[in-house]
């Protein structure tokens, strides 16, 4: 039996906000989308989204959309980091126990977002050197947030260095099926045959995993440890063909 839908407010109708709202709506959650920038609101509406334009600096307006009055989760996804910080301060003052999720690729801003009251800030720069934030597929951001909020709130990003004696040496990236066994999302791979750039799992080309490559995954900390333990122990990691 399905649980009652979560009441979610997505603040920000830019590309990331639209993708988050779309995915959460598809999974059956009750989503309200708001913004204060007219151009973004109109663009989202032309794409079929129901967006309400409100004054985000008005506490009464925030209360009218449900903050402090039954909303379970707030996604702060404005394009401007300072605006997200201000929103978090206001929302936290109205609803001290509200679950608030945001995203930023700037480390100083991440600190400010937590200080302002964020429950979780997705930090794509956990993978140093690969500029994940600039290249991250919007749907992946949405999926990461979705799993962070509706699955576990302790998701992180990790690099798994592939050894030549590893079981997954020689496997193709699209053959890995780590979600069910480890609760890990495969973000992509640094395939040494193509250089040092991160290649996302959504890339249409097939990528064979070789010794020296780096597998990049998202998941809870304990899952990283279990996955690496199994790799070093030589355990069989199932692929899609085994599912």
Image (cartoon, rainbow, N blue to C red):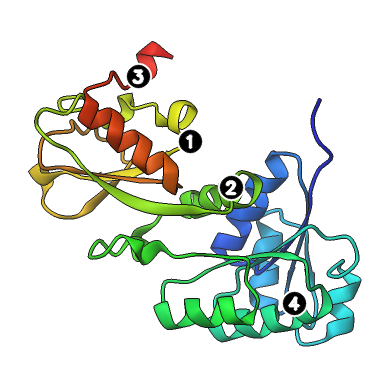
Local packing at callout 2 (Cα closer than 10 Å; few below 14, some 14-19, many 20+) is few
Q: Using the rendered image of the protein, determine whether residue 186 is visible from the camera's viewpoint.
A: no
Q: Position of residue 155 (x, y in %)?
A: 49, 52
Front position in the image: 144 or 51:
144
Q: Is residue 235 above or below residue 155?
A: above
At mark 4, the secondary structure is: helix
Is residue 201 rendered to the left or right of residue 27?
A: left
List x then y, in percent, for residue 232.
21, 31
Question: Circle 2 sits on which residue?
Answer: 152
Residue 193 position by quadrant: top left
Q: Which residue is mark 1?
A: 183
Task: Residue 47: give its label.
Answer: none
Q: Position of residue 113 (x, y in %)?
A: 56, 78
Q: Earlier in the sequence, mark 4 or mark 2?
A: 4
Chain-order first, disc 1 or disc 2: 2
238 relative to 169, above or below: above
**Residue appearing at x 66%, y 85% in the figure:** 86
Query: Which residue is the site of mark 3?
Result: 238
């Amino acid at each position: 039996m399905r649980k009652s839908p979560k009441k979610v407010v997505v603040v920000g109708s830019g590309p990331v906000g639209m993708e988050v709202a779309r995915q959460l709506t598809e999974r059956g959650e009750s989503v309200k989308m708001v913004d204060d920038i007219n151009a973004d609101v109109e663009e989202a509406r032309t794409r079929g989204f129901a967006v309400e334009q409100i004054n985000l600096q008005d506490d009464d307006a925030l209360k009218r959309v449900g903050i402090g009055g039954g909303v379970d989760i707030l996604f702060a996804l404005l394009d401007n980091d300072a605006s997200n910080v201000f929103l978090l301060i206001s929302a936290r003052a109205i609803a001290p126990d509200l679950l608030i999720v945001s995203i930023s690729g700037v480390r100083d801003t991440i600190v400010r977002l937590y200080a302002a009251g964020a429950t979780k800030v997705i930090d794509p720069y956990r993978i140093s050197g690969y500029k994940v934030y600039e290249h991250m597929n919007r749907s992946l951001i949405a999926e990461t947030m979705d799993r962070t909020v509706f699955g576990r709130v302790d998701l992180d990003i990790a690099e798994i260095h592939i050894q030549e004696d590893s079981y997954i040496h020689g496997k193709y990236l699209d053959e890995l099926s780590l979600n069910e066994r480890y609760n890990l999302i495969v973000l992509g791979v640094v395939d040494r045959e193509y250089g040092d750039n991160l290649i996302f799992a959504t890339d249409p080309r097939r990528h064979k995993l070789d010794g020296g490559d780096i597998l990049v995954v998202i998941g809870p900390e304990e899952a990283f440890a279990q996955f690496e333990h199994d790799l070093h122990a030589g355990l069989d990691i199932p692929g899609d063909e085994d599912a």
